[in-house]
């Protein structure tokens, strides 16, 4: 069992930056693929980024490539999402997710554990 807790959300102006953190419980964090998803009002939850256990395989949705960076610190059981050049369309609740093993997982149903989410609001 893994428990995930996100933090770092907030209100920021367009063009600004935020860093989200996701802290995980459990001794096997380093074996999990970690993902970030987001859900804007009235929209379905969408994949944002994922990182494998070692940080050697990373993937982003096209809309955030070049602006967002996912990383992890296995010693701290934490995964991060650095968000630069934020746009109003990035406004959403951001969720951290985890699953065992390594793979090309980008669908909600492929992830076993979820955090409660953190709100990111980008004003124009």
Image (spheres, helix red, strand yellow):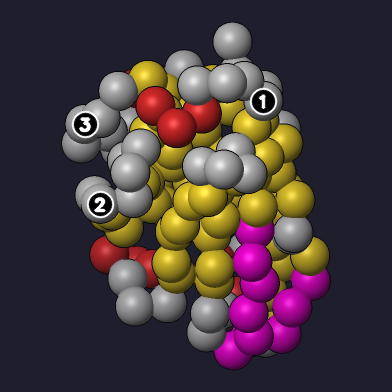
User: To which quarter of the image does residue 1 belong?
Assistant: top right
Q: Residue furthest top?
A: 1
Mark drawn on residue 56: 2
Mark drawn on residue 44: none
User: Which of the two discs, 1 and 3, labels the residue nearer the N terminus?
Assistant: 1
Magenta includes 95?
Answer: no
Residue position marked by numbered label 1 in the rendering: 25
Give the residues drawn in magenta, as a range.
Answer: 11-20
User: To which quarter of the image does residue 33 belong?
Assistant: top left
Q: Residue furthest right?
A: 11
Residue 94 placement (x, y as % from top left): 61, 49
Residue position marked by numbered label 3 in the rendering: 103
For the point 44% across and 38% down, the residue is 34
Q: Is residue 99 visible?
A: yes
Residue 88 placement (x, y as % from top left): 60, 75
Residue 17 vs residue 33, the one in the foreground? 33
Residue 78 placement (x, y as % from top left): 60, 45
């Amino acid at each position: 069992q893994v428990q995930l807790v996100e933090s770092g959300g907030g209100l920021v102006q367009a063009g600004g930056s935020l860093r989200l953190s996701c802290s995980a419980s459990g001794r096997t964090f380093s074996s999990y693929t970690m993902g970030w998803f987001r859900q804007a009002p009235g929209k379905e939850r969408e994949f944002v980024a994922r990182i494998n256990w070692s940080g050697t395989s990373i993937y982003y949705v096209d809309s955030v490539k070049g602006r967002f960076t996912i990383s992890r610190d296995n010693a701290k059981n934490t995964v991060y999402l650095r968000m630069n050049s934020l746009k109003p369309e990035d406004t959403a609740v951001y969720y951290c997710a985890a699953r065992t093993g390594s793979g090309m997982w980008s669908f909600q149903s492929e992830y076993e554990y979820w955090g409660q989410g953190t709100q990111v609001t980008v004003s124009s």
